[in-house]
Amino acid sequence: MSDNVILIRYGELYLKGKNKDYFENILKNNIRKKLADINCKLYFGRGRYVVKDYESADEPIILNRLKHVFGVHSTSVAKRCGYDFDEIAELAISIVPQNGTFRVTSHRSYKKYPLNSLQINMQLGERILQAKPQLTVDLHSPQYVLNVDVRENGDVYLYDDSERCVGGMPYGTGGNGLLLLSGGIDSPVAGYMLAKRGMSLSALHFHSYPYTSQAAKEKAIELARILGEYCPGISLTCISLTEIQETIHKCCKPNYMITLVRRFMMRIAERVANKLNCGCIINGESLGQVASQTLESITVTNAVVNMPVFRPLIGMDKDEIIEIAEKIGTFKISIEPYEDCCTVFLPDYPLIKPTLEKVEEQESKIANYNELIERAIENIETIVL
Ligand code: ATP
Ligand code: MG
C-alpha cells in the first residue's frame, strides 16, 4: 500500500450556490465509476476529495484516469500523517529540500485544530529551519512551497506540487447532445468541448458504404471510443447516406451536392436526436473553413432543424483545433487517410453562397424526399463501444 494520497480539487462548482450538491454528487459518482476497478478508498471532504490506500503501482493509473474526469480541476500527490504536530514536523522535514528558499502555506478545513493556519506556517517553518539551517524563508517568491492541508477526517496532507486536469463541469450535468461525428479532426474536438461543459454525448456517423470503406467507419468507431474515456456510456449510431447521395446525384445540379447532403444530414440528425432524448445537435463547423461552412451555407443547412445546433469551434483556427485534438488523443486517428461521405460525388465547384430559394428549388426535384429519410433511419446501426 502506498503512503501517498491523491488530492482532488474541483473548480467552478463552487459558483453553483444551492445547486452545488447536485453537481458535486454527479462528480463524486463519476470519480467513483472511473476508479471502480482500482483497489483504493475515496474520501469526499468539503472542497477537496482524497484517494487513499491504493497500491503504489496504481498511482500513475489513478492520476491518468482523473485527467479524464470533467470537473476535476487539479490533483496533487501528497504525504499523509495524523494531527500530532511532531509527526507533521518530522514529515515536513523529510520532504523539504536541503537548501534554498521556502515557505509553508497551510490550509485548515478542520477548524478545531489547536493551531490556526498562520501558527502552523510559523511553527512548522521554525522546526524546518532548525533541522535544515541552510534553508531560508521567503514568503513572496520562494523556490519551494510546502503546502499543509489539515482535514476533518484526522488526516494532514503535505505536498508541494499540483497538476492541472481537464476542469469543466461534471459529465452528465449539461443535458444530452447528439454529436455529428465524421472521421475528421474537428468533430471529436467539438464533442469534447461540449462534454467538458457537462453535456452527455451520443454520436451519429454517416457513411456512404460501399463508396466509403469499412475502414472509414472503423475510424469513427475508434474516435467515439477515445471520446468515451471522457464521456462514459457514449453511444455511436451509424446511418447510410448512399441512397440519398445517389438520388441527389441523379436529380440535382452537381454544385448543390454538398449543401443538399448537409440538409439531409441535419434533418436525419434531428430525428435521431429526438429518439435518443438529445436536446441539441453538435457539429465541428468553423466559419469559412470550407464551402459548406460560410455564413450562407450554415444558414441554409440550419434552416431545416428546430433544435439548437451548437458549433463550439465556429471561431477557432485549424491549428487551435489540432492542438486540442492532440491533447485529447483523437488527432492521430483523425489523420488516417480514409474518405468521408462528404467526398462522395464531390463537385468541382461547390456552392459558397447558396440561397434558400435556389436550394429548395433543387430539393423539390427529389420526389421521394421523406421516403429517403425514413429508409435511412430504418436502417440505423447502433454500435456498442
Ligand atoms: P471534420 O474534421 O469534423 O470532419 P470538416 O472540416 O471535414 O470537419 P465538414 O466535412 O464540412 O468539415 O463537416 C462539418 C461537420 O459536419 C463536421 O465537423 C461534423 O460535425 C459533420 N459531419 C461531416 N461529415 C460527417 C459524417 N460523415 N458523419 C457525421 N457528421 C459529419
Ligand atoms: Mg469531415
Image (cartoon, helix red, strand yellow):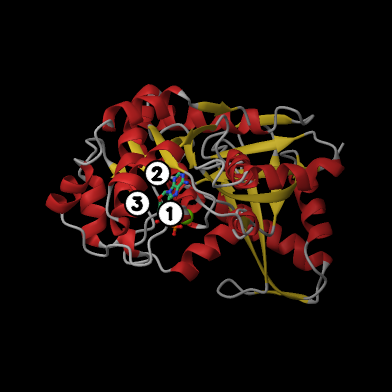
Q: Is mark 3 within 8 Å of ligand 1?
A: no
Position of residue 70 measured from the top left corner of the image (x, y, whole percent): 52, 43
Distance between mark 2 and mark 3 Cα atoms: 24 Å
Q: Residue at x 51, y 40 (%)?
A: 47
Question: Label 2: which residue?
Answer: 245
Q: Is residue 26 left or right of residue 257?
A: right
In percent of width and height, residue 76 lies at: 67, 51
Q: Amino acid at mark 3?
A: Arg
Q: Secondary structure at mark 1?
A: loop
Give the answer, above or below, for where 80 lies relative to 369. Answer: below
CA–CA distance between discs 1 and 2? 8 Å
Upstream in the sequence, badge 3 or badge 1? 3
Ligand 1 contact, mark 2 (Cβ < 8 Å): no
Write the residue at 25% across / 57% down: 297
Q: Label 3: how many residues lie within 10 Å, few (<14), some (14-19) or many (20+)?
A: some
Q: Is residue 12 left or right of residue 95?
A: left
Q: Position of residue 360 (x, y in %)?
A: 17, 45
Q: Is residue 60 left or right of residue 355?
A: right
**Which residue is identified by label 3?**
311
The answer to whether marks 2 and 3 mark residues whose Cβ atoms lie closer than 8 Å is no
Q: Which mark is residue 345?
A: 1
Q: Crowding near pointer 2: few (<14 within 10 Å), some, many (20+)?
A: many
Q: CA distance from mark 3 to mark 1?
A: 26 Å
Are the residues flagged by discs 1 and 2 in contact, CB closer than 8 Å?
yes
**Which image quadrant for residue 232?**
top right
Secondary structure of the residue carrying tag 3 is: loop
Q: Quadrant of the C terminus?
A: top right
**The N terminus is located in which quarter?**
top right
